[in-house]
Amino acid sequence: MTSPDFLTIDGESRRVSLDAANPAFYGNPNAVYARIQAACPTFYWEERKQWFFSSYDHVNGLLRDRRFGRQITHIASREELGLAADPPHIADFVQSEAHSLLAIEPPEHTRLRTLVNRAFVSRHIEKLAPEIAALAHSLIDGFEKDGRTELLSRFAEIIPVTIIARMIGIPDDMCRTLLDWSHAYVRMYMFNRTEADEIAANRVAKEFSDYLRTVIAERRAHPRDDLMSHMIHTEHKGQYLTEDELISTTIVLLNAGHEATVHQIGNSMRVILESGLDPKALFGDAAATELTVEECLRICAPVHVFERWALEDVEIDGVHLKRGDEIALILAAANLDPKKYTDPLTFKPDRKEAPNLSFGAGIHFCIGAPLARLELNIALPILFERLPGMRIAETPVVKDVYHFHGLERLDLEW
């Protein structure tokens, strides 16, 4: 089988050349992952100048391996590691990320996560079910009679950002601004980002932070029954979160709390509608719904790559890594490992095989996973219940936002 012109695989040397900006790749990454896994699941991506791991066992193991971390500067300076200084034009972004749960290691990570985690455990999240269902129904009320809609802007974007904002204690009328900030902010994590992307992300990081300072000040003076007040006024071993820690934590909760879920709703709807399977069977009861959602998470995950720093010299799968080397783990490819899943490129909602890795694993397992799963388990069945005969009206176009995976828009009719 010949490889497409944007992909070259040398299985013997485990070298891969792959243009991540090619629509044939980001439009259908699963097909490329299957080719790479067949030749060399561990590979050096020439354009990224980095080792990537894509097998299920390696990704799952490395996510839990404490010889690797999301942070490196807690054990060595940038100068010691030969890392360039952050450019001045992203100073505000760097400051807003300084205490991000996604980018720090214990003991700081343990303290911050402990203070936040209580709000995201399943028994608390499940109480939001009626509110999520009511919001889904009210949104569908707004377009049901039209016979068609663009689902991302009219539905998928609104539910996750509204729910996470309400949890934190940010008013609904800020949700549009939060979406705009988030879209610009997360471009910092994309492959092939430009300096213009960086400047825009830095600007919104400052706007985001300045806004949150006003919310923090108000909640210090007048606490409410919301997550922001909880984070401000709860101590862990005699310590409270600083203002900078509160800002970093809130930004990551707002961004992670909706950005990926928006993509997952759109991706899931596309996969289900293109499968031709009967929605009544897919969502026949709670058990069937849960299996369907998990299979959607497996085959069309919204976040494809997480990176880790080697905290010491180590060898993984014959690859010799030095302290300070950065590796990448392809969660979405691990979800397609043929050693774990039969016919992995096929959507099979009745699968009962290995759990997907779309939310990660280990100490950085997605804190919002229970909320995302609840939103999917509620929103998807309601859509098919309210809009029988739903079908894709125009061929969906995938966003050029690798390593996220989502649609530009999803036009549906019924």
Image: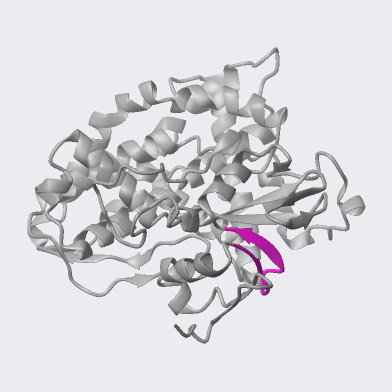
Q: Is residue 361 above or below residue 113?
A: below
Q: Residue at x 23, y 30 (%)?
A: 130
| Quadrant of the image occupied by residue 395 | bottom left
| Quadrant of the image occupied by residue 91 | bottom right
**Count of numbered labels shown in the rendering:** 0
Q: Is residue 385 above or below residue 32?
A: above
What x and y, as percent, mark residue 298?
Answer: 38, 51
Quadrant of the image for the N terminus?
Answer: bottom left
Magenta stretch bounds: 42-53
Q: Is residue 92 above or below residue 409?
A: above
Q: In the image, is 48 to the left or to the right of 132?
A: right
What x and y, as percent, mark residue 240?
Answer: 67, 20
Q: Residue at x 31, y 40 (%)?
A: 375
Would you say residue 326 is visible in this rendering? yes
Quadrant of the image for the C terminus?
Answer: bottom left
Q: Nearer the viewer, residue 368 or 159?
A: 368
